[in-house]
Each structure stands twice: as structure tokens, then as C-alpha cells.
Amino acid sequence: MLMNQLTPRQIVAELDKYIIGQDEAKRAVAIALRNRYRRSRLAPEVREEITPKNILMVGPTGVGKTEIARRLAKLVDAPLVKVEATKFTEVGYVGRDVDSMVRDLVETSLRQVKERMGKDVELTAEQNAQERILDALVAKEKGEKKANVNPIEALLGPVRKEEDPPEVRESKRKQRERLRMELLCGSLEGELIEIDVEDNSTGEMLPGMEVSISDMMGGLMPKKKKIRKVSVIEARKILKAEEIGKLIDMDKATSEAVYKAEEDGIIFIDEIDKVAGRSQSGGPDVSREGVQRDILPIVEGCTVNTKYGPVKTDHMLFIAAGAFHVAKVTDLIPELQGRFPVQVSLKPLTEADFRSILTQPENALIKQYQALMGVDDVELTFTEDALCEMAHIAAEMNDSRENIGARRLHTLMEELLDEVAFSGGESGPENIEIDGAYVRDHLMKEVKQFDIAKHII
């Protein structure tokens, strides 16, 4: 969807289709997204001075923080990566280079650009793949075996062979056309053929670097080939993907991917509260503050070297999120706090929210399970009291123990429909109605465990 077609109000309306509540957070990200479009319409000298207003979401787990960022990126087809801040502290001081989040974003951006460009050359790629399949079928009828490609031929091209007489050429043409007709009719889909494909196995990685030797050599060496024996239907997928790769202008794709990452990229940093250390405590907090200081220049705006060239982070949008149950936002280093000027709070989910989550979103849990069981001709229906009972139990369990937000509903649905999912469809089509009594009976074990846990000190 084009950014200029969406006002902040329309962006919120789109997010409402998938996320219940959290109006303050939706409003903040909608404004941030629209401001990107507004910035793109300004004169270059003004545009360069305006940077995104990064967002810090504060709220318990399972209330929609990640989902908001994910849906936002899908809405305008922007590259998005999600990283957990904690992974940078897993091995001593800084478990993984924090620059990797930018490299991951560029890879995501390149994949999106290649997918879009691939659609433009899809028809030509299908035709080229078809011809290669025909080559393999003709060779199979002749009883020829594929030999490994000669390295000299791979570099300089195949050795020129003498031309066949006219009658042989005509015979080959008729054979090829016959096989083409059989292929178009679908009668050869299960036929096994041998095809030459590129060997995409990753080369040896250099110590301490995220690029392989083959990446560094680029196009200096001919690409390795290998022979695979596959069915025609599988060969069509493999060869089509390979042909799309050949038809795409990689220089143009890389240039566009870097531009999109720099101008439209979104980096979602989750669990940022886990690297918020308190100054009066010692030990591990040194590592946590170190991670914050390493993240800081990327959020402030710097240049990161990637295998596709230098990438600027000045205009990327950063969204950080954390529960902040133990640490507080003020426990982050002041410089990092200042780089997230928009701070929004997400509220814990209520019983009414759980009731809405079950049925209202376009990807609602009830709809998902109904679709799954429909594959086996099992029609699931839920009564109003069943939905209310499930929402009540989810809210009670979150209050009793860990508050895991909407994820509690996934646990309850799996327990509730365990028997239905196991034996559904065995006796043919059936209609199953889930009512309040069914919910209480099947979730009683879960409820009792949580009731007991309340009284254990």
C-alpha cells in the first residue's frame, strides 16, 4: 500500500483489524509513519535535517507491542527486523555485534526488492525454465547422462560442435514439440529428470566476519554447478527461481534495497528493559550498560559497513519495547532515553479485551481453529457463554500467576480443543458446539492448578 494513501486515522483503522485496544501506541506509530511521507515531500536541504522520532513502548508481555510494529511494516511494505536486546549480552560482554541488526535489515530489504522485481520477470523465467526442462527430457529419452560441467566450459562457454544434418534437426524438433505438448498437458509432472543447478552452499566463513570467502570473491570465479535428480514439478520450481535470479539486475536491486533500508527501514528492539542496569548494583550491569552504549550510535545515526556497501542509519525508525517490571525507563542511560522521544504505555489486557481478541481481529484465534478443523470437515461453533468463560479464565490465570497477555488464550485453546484436534474427522463430517459447560469441564484442570498456586507461598 502506498504511504501517501494512508492518513494517521486510516493507519490506526488498519491496525484495529488485528490489534485490540492500545490506542495510544497505535496513534504514536501512525503519526511516525505519516511523518515519513511528509518528510519525503520536502526539499532535499530540509529533508536531510528531519530525523524520525523513535518510539519506546512500555507494557507487559503479550499486549501487542511486537504485533503493532509487524503490522505497521506490512502496511507499507517496509523492511523490518526484530531483535532482542538481551542477545547482545549472552556471551560475556556483547554476545553479538550490534551492527548485525542493520545488516539483517539490509538483507530483509533486499529480499523484498528481489521478490517485487521477480514478479516483473516471472513470465520470462517460467518460459526459460520450461526450455531447460525440455532439454532434460530430450536428454533422458536419448539415454544421455548428465556429466559434471567442465570448468573450462563454465568459464569460456561450451565447445562448439558440428551442426546436425537437416533431417536430424527436424527429428529433434518433432521430438521436442511432442515432449512440449505432453508437458503442457501435465502428463510428465512426476517424471524424474536430471538438471544442472547452481550450488548455493555457503562458502567458508572468515573468523570474526559475517561474509564468506565466496561473497568476497563476488563474480570473479564461475559459479559451481551440481546435478540433481528431481521430478518435473519440483524442477520447475527450482529452475524458475534460478532463472528469476539471472533476470534480476542485482546492482539495481542492491542499490534500491540499501535506499529502502535507509529511508523506510524499521528496527524493533525488544526487551530493552533487560539491558537497563541500575548504577548502584554491580556485576552484570556493566555488560548491560555496555550494550546500551553500543546501540546508542546506531540509533543516533551512523554508517555501518555491510557486504552491500556502507549503510546510514540516520533516517531509520527505531521502536524499542520492554515490560519495565523491575527496571524503570530512567534506568536506561540518559543519552539513549533521549533518542526515544515518543514514549507510550500499553495497558494490560482486561477480560473484555480477551473476549474481543477471540473473535474480532481478522486473524482471530476462533477463526484460525475453525479453518484448521474445517480441513477435516469438522465445523466448530462457539456459544456466547463459551467465549465469555474463556475470557474470564484467561484473565483469572494472568492475575494468578505470570501475566503473559494474549498468549494465555493460545494455551487455553490448545487445552480446550486437544481431543477435538486429535480425533476430529475420524468418523466423517461433524458439527461440534463448544459451550460454557464444555469450557469449564475441559479447562478445570488448568484452573485448579492456578487456584492451588494462589495459596502456595
Image: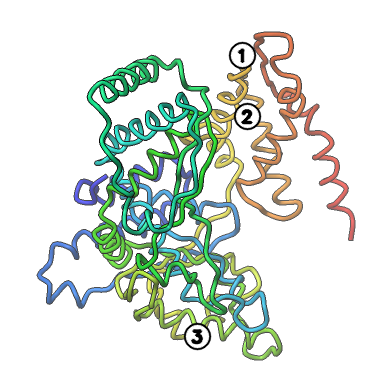
Image quarter of residue 409:
top right
The Cα atoms of the two marked residues, 2 and 1, are separated by 22 Å
Q: Which residue is mark 1?
A: 377
Query: Residue drawn 28% across and 50% down?
Result: 248
Q: Is residue 196 above or below residue 339?
A: above
Looking at the image, is mark 3 or mark 1 earlier in the sequence?
A: 3
426 to the left or right of 305 = right
Three-letter amino acid code at disc 2? Answer: Leu
Name the mark on residue 410.
none
368 to the left or right of 432 = left
Label 3 secondary element: helix
Residue 206 placement (x, y as % from top left): 54, 76
Q: Which residue is mark 2?
A: 387
Label 2 environment density (alpha carbons within 10 Å; few <14, some 14–19, many ≥20):
many
Label 3 environment density (alpha carbons within 10 Å; few <14, some 14–19, many ≥20):
some
Three-letter amino acid code at disc 1? Answer: Asp
Q: Is residue 206 above or below residue 150?
A: below
Residue 391 placement (x, y as % from top left): 64, 37
The Cα atoms of the two marked residues, 3 and 1, are separated by 56 Å
Query: Residue drawn 49% across and 61% down?
Result: 82
Viewer-side residue, 449 vs 425: 425
Q: Residue furthest left?
A: 43
Viewer-side residue, 12 vs 362: 362
> In front: mark 2 or mark 1?
1
Q: Which residue is mark 3?
A: 293
Residue 175 placement (x, y as % from top left): 34, 19
The Cα atoms of the two marked residues, 2 and 3, are separated by 47 Å
Q: Is residue 92 above or below residue 318?
A: below
User: Decide: marks 3, 1 in contact (CB < 8 A)?
Assistant: no
Label 1 secondary element: loop
Query: Residue drawn 39% across and 16% down?
Result: 182
